[in-house]
Image (cartoon, grey):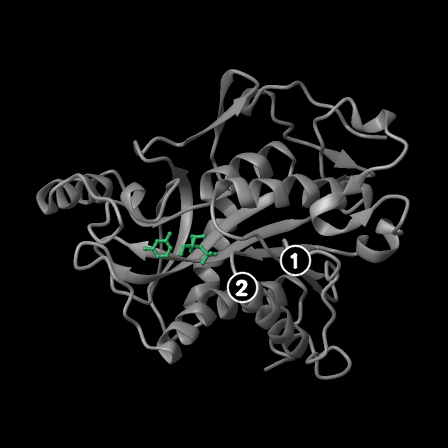
Amino acid sequence: MASILPASNRSMRPDKNTYEGKRSVYVKNPYLDAMDEDILYHLDLGTKTHNLPAMFGDVKFVCVGGSPNRMKAFAQFMHKELQLEGDGEDIEDICAGTDRYCMFKTGPVLSISHGMGIPSISIMLHELIKLLHHARCCDVTIIRIGTSGGIGIAPGSVVITDTAVDSFFKPRFEQIILDNVVTRSTELDKELATDLLNCSRETPGFPTLIGHTMCTYDFYEGQGRLDGALCSFSREKKLDYLKRAYKAGVRNIEMESTVFAAMCGLCGLRAAVVCVTLLDRLESDQINLSHDVLVEYQQRPQLLISNFIKKQLGLCGQMS
Ligand SMILES: O=P(O)(O)O[C@@H]1C[C@H](O)[C@@H](CO)O1
Ligand SMILES: O=c1cc[nH]c(=O)[nH]1
């Protein structure tokens, strides 16, 4: 039976969403219960066509990121790190029937791509959260492992988000529902962020810090870039904006964190955002890293999260 919560936000958020003593995944939709079948169209999965509890009931960690190749590489990496059977090279895309998103499962870890931007990740999250709910998953931690532009920090730094903010540096996500603007909280799990920072101290090789992450609707004008097809502001205005963002506590900019924080928070998922920075936006706009450096930077959040997951599973010390 679907757990229905009042349709508002933080003040109504369940503190103890327990399911047989465990933290369950909530859906907040009174219509779902009455549906004979739920087709998760963009994932090419469904409640009648697939045995979701059998396929996904043991999932404890969900990692999401924009790029299908990155999320496949992460799944293959986790396969090795968890010392699962086989080499993991032929890992199967569970969503192969659609080319919207890809999804891989390695033991209790699900790795899913979400494309670029709020609308794309939002569609994926609606269907993923219903999937976890239908599969009766509990105690799930979800982490976005992404790339971002840094502000005032060295390229290659990994930022663990404490609060996702919008372009006005406000901790909110505005969802348009019918012709209303519904404002939702973008708070993330502070304890999880601290645990990840502690874990980063045992993962040497790159700087990691906690800070606010600004989420925008666009990569170019929306992030104050001077190199888009359109630009109507001066270099001075750009730098003034980015410096004000830094002053407000923003350390990196990407395009998904606010809706990710809002939706996961409302549905009872312990959530974190961990993004590597590809450049310092106070210095430049263009990403001119070599392919090898780009690949190595993208592995940094993966390394940190893999160590965190192994620790959580009590596997540290026994493995590479
Ligand atoms: O997870 P990714 O690396 O896709 O996140 C950022 C935000 C946008 O989706 C994209 C822009 O290049 O990168
Ligand atoms: O500058 C950047 C780099 C990656 N992703 C972003 O959204 N912005």
Q: Residue at x 79, y 37 (%)?
A: 19
| Label 2 sits on residue | 305
Under circle 1, the secondary element is: loop
Q: Residue at x 57, y 52 (%)?
A: 114
Q: Residue at x 51, y 49 (%)?
A: 272
What is the x, y in percent for residue 80? 65, 79
In screen coordinates, is 217 left or right of 311? left
Which residue type does callout 1 highlight?
Answer: Asp
In screen coordinates, is 155 left or right of 55? left
The quadrant in which residue 216 appears is top left
The quadrant in which residue 218 appears is top left
Seen from this angle, which residue lies furthest top? Answer: 179
In screen coordinates, is 148 left or right of 260? left
Which residue type does callout 2 highlight?
Answer: Ile
Total tally of numbered discs in the picture = 2
What is the x, y in percent for residue 120? 55, 45
The C terminus, quarter of image: bottom right
Q: Residue at x 38, y 72 (%)?
A: 294
Under circle 2, the secondary element is: helix
What is the x, y in percent for residue 136? 81, 44
Q: Nearer the viewer, residue 32 or 132?
A: 32
Residue 269 appears anywhere in the view: no
What is the x, y in percent for residue 135? 81, 47
> Does ligand 1 reach within 8 Å of label 1's beta carbon?
no
Between disc 2 and disc 1, the foreground one is: 1
| Label 1 sits on residue | 99
Seen from this angle, which residue lies furthest front? Answer: 229
Q: Nearer the viewer, residue 221 or 131?
A: 221
